[in-house]
Image: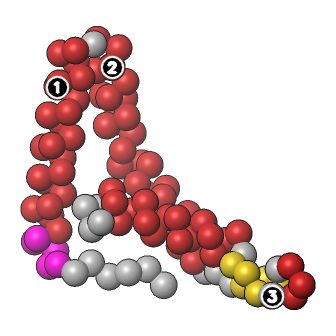
Amino acid sequence: MSEQPKWTPEQASERAAEKAIADLRKGIEAAENSAQAGENYVCMAAAGPALYAFARRALEYFESREDVVDGSYGEPQPSEEMILAQEGRAALAKAEGRE
């Protein structure tokens, strides 16, 4: 299951706006320092919403398949899906400013 945010939708929107402003400032600084770095940043910023939507869908997929498997000597260990779901939750928490 995915974690629920610990803030209201209004607070989440405010945090997202603050993060977007900070990200834009980074892009401006990159553009001032290097034309190529600025161009790369703009391309990544434009792709951001699609990448985020993909990451959410991928996380849902892996969460629906989380399980343990038999490891060495029959000891249970996390499945590849469980590992990817854990990594996905951590990455999204960081991207959403919850980390």
The residue labelled by disc 2 is: 37
CA gap, disc 3 to disc 2? 48 Å
Of badges 1 and 3, nearer the viewer stands: 3
**What residue do we see at 28% from left, 11% from top?**
35
Secondary structure at numbered mark 1: helix
Instruction: Specify the amino acid type for callout 2.
Output: Ala
Of badges 3 and 2, nearer the viewer stands: 3
- Residue 62 rendering spot, x and y as whole percentages: 61, 72
Quick one: 29 or 53, which is closer to the camera?
A: 29
On screen, residue 35 versus residue 58, left or right, reads: left
CA gap, disc 2 to disc 1? 10 Å
Instruction: Specify the amino acid type for callout 1.
Output: Ile
In the rendered structure, find residue 75 and report the number of the disc placed on it: 3
Tell me: residue 73, above or below residue 60.
below
* Quarter of the image where the C terminus is located: bottom left
Instruction: Specify the amino acid type for callout 3.
Output: Glu
The residue labelled by disc 1 is: 28
Q: Which residues are magenta?
A: 7-11
Tell me: residue 81, above or below residue 50.
below
Q: Quadrant of residue 33?
A: top left
Magenta region's main secondary structure?
helix
Secondary structure at numbered mark 2: helix
